[in-house]
Image: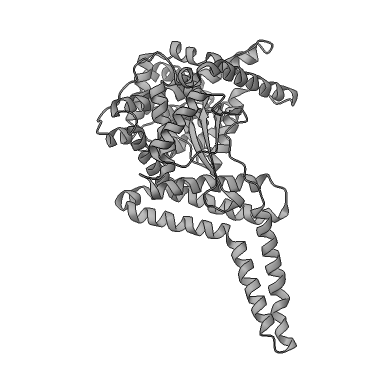
């Protein structure tokens, strides 16, 4: 799939309209695949009825012997499919539904944005434990047209951004429903999400009649995900214009930086610490969601934030995530550089959840602890690294990982599965970004561990790109030289 995405890069730049026409045509093909059995059934029934009324001799009955059974089978398969209930996708089992009574200020904000963008009413609103805001459209009777719309808002996001930043991010998603700036790409994005709903529901079903749909949709989805990669990225870029309807460009540029910093902190520091603390003190009550905002405010330093944003800003290519590059998003606003976020007094959760916030965080922390308890009772090892690795391994089967996620995937794979499994991932990182010092260093380190002298060259290149690694590299080289006389065979085969 990555090869397909990379090969389309120059094409979509040269001729965006032709590229979108190709993706739309393939989407129409996908809808035809979904409607294949009802159309086939109708054609066979029409043919059978026509043959019945034009019957002249007994030999004319032969076509009916196969037309009627095939029509009946197609109709049965379609009936099973159309009566299958699609469930709104949820990224986690930790969530709560909300309404005007529970969170009046949040609901008032959503209604305000719906009126501003003239969108149809959202059917259900969920607060989840994920760091994002997402819109899902679940088709009625499995037909890929307009269905029930669900808005899912991540509590961690509300805990770490300001009220104005949250309003801008929420405007991006609600604005996308209006399809004002993104008529084509918006529909393609909704269709991609619906494909995943079809696939997940058919996969969970044990009824034999849904197997044909599962295999058809799975094969189709793999190709469509690669073809539509840049269309979905265009849709995300167009969504930024909805945010700029609500806040000015300076505030939104800071919002982009804030979300990058916060997401990195939660994923790589906060949750790792929470799971580690819980393992060390299994009988102690842990309250991650209640303490999330204060932990972020106290832990994230300006110097590290600037380093992280600078790293993201310098990225020129990313074939892993449909999220547009930071540089591209800022250039669309006329900015040649990034803006670091300024401090703020109250989080979006404090403003829009108001008095409901303590209750919401208490519920989420209780559900989080219950999930960990369930894992213990089923003898599932409580290992946050293994959980994260499994999550990334499952995700990479469905969609490309971001650059940060790919690096995390490689590190966790090496740590848990071993060198052999991690090597191809490190090499993939270097194929996409030959200047990735950490991946180069990892390759050199592993080579030297197998006494392969080519690891010296890899370490030298890595330390040239990142001088801060020199001390560790010197230690690795010294240990290699100490055992070089008893060196085993080089690991060429492993790195083939």
Left/right of residue 308 with respect to residue 30 in the rendered view: left
Instruction: Please state which of residues 290 and 119 is positioned toward the viewer in this rendering.
Output: 119
At x 38%, y 26%, the residue is: 462
Left/right of residue 451 with respect to residue 172 in the rendered view: right
Q: Position of residue 161 (x, y in %)?
A: 43, 21
Q: Position of residue 265 (x, y in %)?
A: 46, 20
Instruction: Please state which of residues 478 and 59 is positioned toward the viewer in this rendering.
Output: 59
Q: Which colour scheme is used?
A: one colour
Left/right of residue 306 with respect to residue 57 in the rendered view: left
Tell me if residue 135 comes above or below residue 353 in the rendering.
below
- In the rendered picture of this protein, how many numbered marks are placed on residues? 0
At x 75%, y 23%, the residue is: 377
Tell me if residue 259 comes above or below residue 7 in the rendering.
above
Q: Position of residue 154 (x, y in %)?
A: 51, 27
Q: Position of residue 213 (x, y in %)?
A: 63, 55
Splitting the image into 4 quarters, where does residue 360 fall? top right
Q: Can residue 259 be seen in this view?
A: yes
At x 48%, y 32%, the residue is: 133
Instruction: Please state which of residues 175 and 426 is positioned toward the viewer in this rendering.
Output: 175
Q: Can residue 456 be seen in this view?
A: no
Residue placed furthest toward the bottom: 57
Tell me if residue 22 comes above or below residue 325 in the rendering.
below
């Amino acid at each position: 799939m990555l090869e397909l995405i990379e090969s389309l890069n120059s094409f979509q730049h040269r001729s965006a309209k032709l590229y979108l026409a190709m993706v739309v045509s393939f989407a129409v093909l996908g809808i035809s695949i979904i409607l294949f059995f009802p159309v086939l059934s109708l054609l066979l029934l029409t043919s059978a009825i026509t043959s019945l009324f034009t019957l002249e001799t007994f030999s004319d009955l032969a076509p009916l012997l196969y037309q009627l059974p095939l029509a009946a089978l197609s109709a049965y398969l379609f009936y099973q499919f159309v009566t299958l209930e699609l469930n709104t996708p949820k990224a986690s089992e930790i969530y709560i539904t909300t309404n005007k009574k529970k969170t009046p200020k949040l609901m008032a904000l959503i209604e305000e944005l719906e009126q501003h963008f003239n969108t149809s009413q959202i059917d259900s609103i969920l607060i989840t434990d994920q760091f994002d805001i997402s819109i899902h459209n679940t088709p009625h009777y499995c037909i890929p047209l307009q269905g029930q719309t669900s808005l899912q808002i991540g509590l961690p996001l509300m805990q770490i951004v300001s009220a104005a930043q949250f309003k801008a991010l929420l405007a991006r998603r609600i604005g996308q429903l209006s399809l004002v700036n993104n008529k084509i790409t918006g529909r393609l994005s909704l269709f991609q999400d619906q494909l995943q709903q079809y696939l997940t529901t058919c996969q969970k079903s044990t009824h034999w009649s849904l197997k044909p749909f599962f295999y058809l949709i799975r094969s189709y989805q793999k190709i469509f995900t690669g073809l539509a990669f840049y269309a979905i990225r265009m849709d995300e870029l167009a969504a930024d214009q909805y945010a700029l309807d609500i806040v000015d460009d300076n505030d939104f540029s800071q919002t982009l930086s804030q979300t990058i910093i916060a997401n990195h902190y939660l994923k790589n520091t906060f949750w790792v610490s929470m799971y580690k603390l819980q393992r060390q003190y299994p009988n102690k009550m842990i309250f991650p969601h209640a303490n999330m905002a204060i932990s972020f405010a106290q832990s994230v330093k300006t110097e590290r934030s600037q380093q992280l944003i600078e790293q993201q800003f310098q990225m020129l290519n990313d074939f892993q995530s449909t999220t547009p590059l930071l540089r591209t998003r800022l250039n669309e606003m006329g900015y040649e550089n990034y803006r670091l976020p300024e401090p703020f007094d109250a989080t979006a959760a404090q403003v829009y959840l108001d008095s409901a916030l303590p209750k919401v965080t208490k519920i989420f922390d209780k559900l989080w602890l219950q999930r960990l308890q369930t894992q213990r009772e089923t003898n599932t090892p409580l290992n946050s690294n293994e959980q994260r690795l499994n999550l990334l391994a499952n995700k990479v089967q469905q969609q490309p990982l971001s650059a940060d996620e790919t690096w995390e995937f490689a590190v966790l794979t090496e740590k848990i599965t071993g060198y052999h499994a991690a090597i191809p991932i490190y090499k993939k990182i270097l194929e996409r970004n030959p200047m990735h010092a950490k991946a180069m260093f990892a390759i050199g380190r592993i080579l030297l561990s197998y006494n392969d002298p080519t690891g010296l060259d890899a370490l030298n290149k890595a330390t040239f790109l990142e001088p801060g690694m020199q001390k560790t590299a010197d230690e690795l080289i010294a240990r290699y030289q100490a055992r070089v006389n008893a060196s085993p065979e080089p690991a060429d085969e492993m790195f083939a």
